[in-house]
Amino acid sequence: MKLKNKTILITGASRGIGYQTAYEVAKEGANVIINYNNSIKQAQELEQLLKKEFDTQTLLVKADIKNEQEIIEMVNKSIKHFKKIDVLVNNAGICNDTLFEDKTKENFMEILETNLVGTFLVSKYVSKQMLKEKSGKIINVSSTNATYSYYPESLDYDASKAGIISLTHNLALHLSPYITVNAVSPGWTKTDMNKNLSKDQIAKEEEKILLKRFAQPQEIAKVIAFLSSEDSNYINNQVINVDGGQKYE
């Protein structure tokens, strides 16, 4: 996998899929910009792990991707440190599963501002630098909830992830031919977002998956790492489901 000396910015890198993506790309020789918001301890632990195991450079950057000014500062700091950003992985996202009747406008907007607007803003400011270089890759993390597996308790999350797919297609068109833009849509994955599921619900959902199990975060991360590499240079404007062969109903 061709990632040696590439600089990759991963939003929400302190946990789950983002954490594993940082590990996978560092393993292949990439420099990693570790974005976090609240989880500073986990971000620091990740940085120490990458430096210990791999010959790579890292940069920790705190930024709330709902905050445009913090995004601008994160991008400027990253470019000042590494001179450029070769790959952006828009991974940061939140979910708040509640009954439809209990959801408020504030709840809904927080999900949209983090998952969708945040992805738009980070892409906007990173792509400016990429266009100057006439080179770059953007990988957006969506979800199968965007297109196939619907859950009314997650309708705000699902809407945000559907928006990311639309954003992916539009950015691929607008940023061509210099920047490729793709999305990865994970199915059920063993992350903190799903840690409170009951055993019965897990069993029910696993029955819908041909592989009869949830994904490990590193299985999603390996696909993101491939899309980050030069081996994927002719893949553009695609949404790749990584769901174990889920049967949608």
Image (cartoon, rainbow, N blue to C red):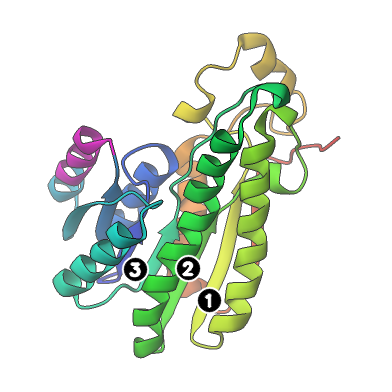
Disc 2, disc 1: CB below 8 Å? yes
Disc 2, disc 3: CB below 8 Å? no
First reached walking from the N terminus: tag 3 or tag 1: 3
> What residue is pinned by disc 1?
180
Q: Residues within 10 Å of mark 1 (few under 14, many from 20)?
A: many
Q: Residue at x 74, y 30 (%)?
A: 152
Q: Position of residue 30 (x, y in %)?
A: 28, 64
The mark closer to the camera, 3 or 1, is: 1
Q: Nearer the viewer, residue 3 or 46?
A: 46
Q: State whether residue 235 appears in this view.
A: no
The segment highlighted magenta reads 38-48
Q: CA distance from mark 2 to mark 1?
A: 6 Å
> What residue is pinned by disc 2?
138
Where is 116 relative to 246, above or below? below
Looking at this view, name the residue that lies furthest to the right: 249
Q: Position of residue 122 (x, y in %)?
A: 41, 63
Q: Amino acid at mark 2?
A: Ile
Q: Residues within 10 Å of mark 3 (few under 14, many from 20)?
A: many
* Quadrant the C terminus occupies: top right
> What residue is pinned by disc 3?
3
